[in-house]
Image (cartoon, coloured by chain):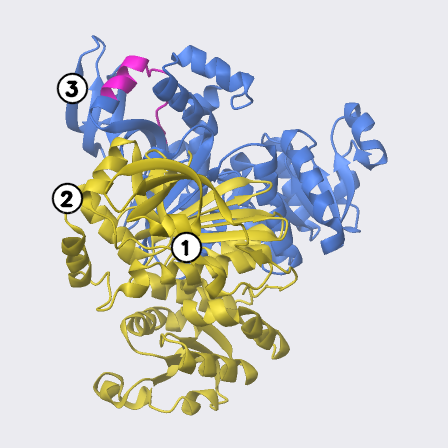
Chain colours: A blue, B yellow
């Protein structure tokens, strides 16, 4: 099988290396790689600088998209699927926005669309979830699905760094982008929990309807106070369905020490989902990084080669997202005068008026 | 697709219920159930009391074996595979002993052999492991894979019960058998870690070569001492490969508080494996119980229906198991006079001479 790769950045290079490792076993050839002309030194003749050189190459059966961003990936994915090429992507932004369209195009053109790497990096999450919902109803999903924020919170909590020190360290070690706003405010988690929820609940969800509140306001003092109460602070994406009413929220969450999510540190991620028949499952591992993410991508590739790929999504439920006016549950609230209180049943407006808040998770 | 079920005990009834839930969606019929004549009241016309009524029924395409034990399951599985029927089993005893034979029979007769439920109950473990080793070398496996012992240790540690009280409670709540010796001494774990290791290392392993030491000697005092040192005691199966040398051990293990395995309580199980490219993955969930185990079985069934089943095992490595004379590592040792010491690099004989011992796991 001949392959095309869109993007030769951190993840692209990982994919290139791993495909090279298994090319004899599966008879693979990475025929063309799309990137900027500057990559000529590294890629030589394989480099193409026009996406159409891959899209219209009839020898290429499957492509891997790791460009990042929205517009070009969307164009590349739809064009490749229309040409009957299977597509593997790690791009949570386009998957969270166009999942139904991509899956339908793959069905219509008799090819595959796979996106295991879009949630949880190197952790298998998408496939176990899809397997699960074939025999189960999954109505609850919890996840620590962002390496940047989890790394910062761990360094502050375990090593006593300030927020700024932890953020600098994260940048230095490759766990935060130069502009980390989308991570810190929870937007990255919005996209991931959208993908998981859409699959589990079989309906379309707009990223705009998902509530999110970030960790920029957290201090060492708040973390110490939370720990004294027997909890650890994590930025958690949670999703819950009751009938067609869905609540999907990304917010700082106090996880009881001893809860499976409390042991998730640094760049590790974890997803927990609860099925109607087999209870709660947790999947844990490296949620970011070149080679772990590339492992998930190449695992998708092998499933396509072996005809075991998993495209399976139907938009069959009309979901009503975050219509509740008052959030049930208990909250740790730091007000504008730094007074801490524990309060129940607050509105989003009340929560956002606080200097910082966190939701309490029960064990 | 018409199905046959061997065994209508706790798990068999769970399978029956779950198949009933999805029979329209996948066009399934549970045609015959093998069990003793006493089950006539519950099963009516579906009951057969001769296994050959299923084996030689050419309308039945797939069977589920949940009899337990060795001899009859072995006969049933081999006979069904030879007739071209796909087989799904939860039986770790026969799978750990005859994996290669079953897989070869399935290949020769163009059918599937699936055994997700044999390790970790309702947790997907086998499939993610098989997916992983296609792109990765997995050389380390750790697991809390026995509900009985984990339930007892949790009740002793968290609620201060004595060993006998915890064992009684486990029996009362259905988490321990009337004769719990195989669980308490780690034999159940031997079989499960054998299956996982054989798959990961692509070689045959005899259960007899796997070292095991149980938890019968544990006391509340020992658990309290271990906890004061910052650890939690768990019965852990560990497996490590270096070249063709393999070390596979089931023994009481001190897990540092904060380690992902430390949060695994009661009847929950967890498996951790470390891949060469994507690092450590953990899978966590209910390791026992009728419906969780049945969920894994029915998930296998759906993968067979959808042509996505995963039979894939080659005995291609000649493994040398537990040849090391001295065990590297650090041990917590309670001697016959109740004196506690921390010692390194002990032989199996030295370990077994202790009143109780536990291995220290590093974070």
Direction front: furthest residue: B337
Q: Quadrant of residue B108?
A: bottom right
Residue mark closest to the camera, 3 vs 2:
2
Relative to residue A22, is residue A352 drawn left or right?
A: left
Q: Position of residue B201 (x, y in %)?
A: 58, 55
**Are marks 1 and 3 in one subunit?**
yes
Where does the C terminus of chain B fall, quadrant-wise?
A: top left
* Residue B305 visible in the shown view: no
Q: Secondary structure at mark 1?
A: loop
Residue mark closest to the camera, 1 vs 3:
3
Q: Which mark is residue B160?
A: 2
Say if the magenta span includes residue A219: yes
* Residue B31 visible in the shown view: yes
In the image, which residues are magenta?
A211-226
Q: Are marks 2 and 1 in contact (CB under 8 Å)?
A: no
Q: Residue at x 35, y 63 (%)?
A: B293
Q: CA distance from mark 2 to mark 1?
A: 50 Å
Q: CA distance from mark 3 to mark 2?
A: 33 Å
Residue mark closest to the camera, 2 vs 1:
2
Q: Secondary structure at mark 3?
A: strand
Q: Position of residue A92 (x, y in %)?
A: 52, 37
Q: Position of residue B2 (x, y in %)?
A: 44, 81
On the image, numbered disc 1 is attached to which residue?
A: A316
**Are marks 3 and 2 in one subunit?**
no
On the image, numbered disc 3 is attached to which residue?
A: A341
Give above or below for B198 relative to B57.
above
Q: Chain under label 2?
A: B
């Amino acid at each position: 099988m001949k392959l095309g790769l869109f993007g030769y950045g951190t993840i692209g290079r990982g994919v290139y290396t791993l495909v090279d490792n298994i090319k004899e076993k599966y008879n693979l050839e990475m025929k063309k790689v799309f990137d900027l002309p500057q990559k000529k030194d590294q890629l030589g003749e394989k480099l193409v600088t026009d996406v159409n050189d891959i899209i219209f190459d009839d020898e290429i059966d499957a492509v891997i998209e790791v460009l990042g961003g929205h517009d070009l990936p969307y164009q590349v994915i739809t064009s490749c699927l229309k040409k009957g090429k299977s597509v593997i992507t790690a791009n949570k932004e386009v998957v969270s926005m166009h999942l139904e369209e991509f899956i339908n195009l793959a069905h219509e053109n008799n090819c595959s669309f796979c996106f295991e790497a879009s949630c949880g990096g190197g952790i298998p999450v998408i496939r176990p979830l899809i397997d699960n919902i074939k025999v189960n109803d999954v109505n609850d999903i919890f996840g620590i699905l962002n390496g940047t924020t989890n790394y910062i919170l761990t360094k502050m909590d375990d090593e006593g760094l300030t927020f700024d020190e932890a953020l600098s360290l994260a940048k230095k070690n490759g766990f935060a982008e130069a502009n980390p706003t989308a991570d810190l405010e929870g937007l990255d988690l919005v996209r991931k929990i959208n993908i998981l929820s859409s699959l589990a609940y079989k309906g379309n969800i707009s990223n705009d309807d998902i509530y999110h509140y970030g960790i920029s306001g957290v201090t060492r003092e708040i973390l110490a106070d939370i720990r004294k109460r027997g909890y650890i602070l994590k930025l958690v994406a949670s999703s819950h369905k009751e009938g067609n009413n869905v609540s999907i929220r990304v917010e700082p969450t106090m996880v009881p020490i001893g809860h499976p999510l409390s042991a998730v540190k640094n760049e590790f991620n974890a997803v927990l989902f609860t099925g109607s028949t087999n209870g709660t499952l947790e999947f844990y591992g490296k949620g970011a990084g070149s080679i772990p993410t590339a492992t998930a991508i190449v695992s998708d590739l092998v499933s396509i080669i072996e005809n075991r790929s998993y495209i399976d999504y139907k938009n069959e439920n009309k979901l009503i997202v975050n219509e509740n006016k008052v959030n049930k549950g208990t909250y740790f609230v730091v007000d504008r005068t730094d007074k801490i209180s524990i309060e129940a049943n607050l509105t989003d407006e009340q929560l956002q008026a606080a200097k910082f808040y966190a939701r309490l998770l029960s064990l």
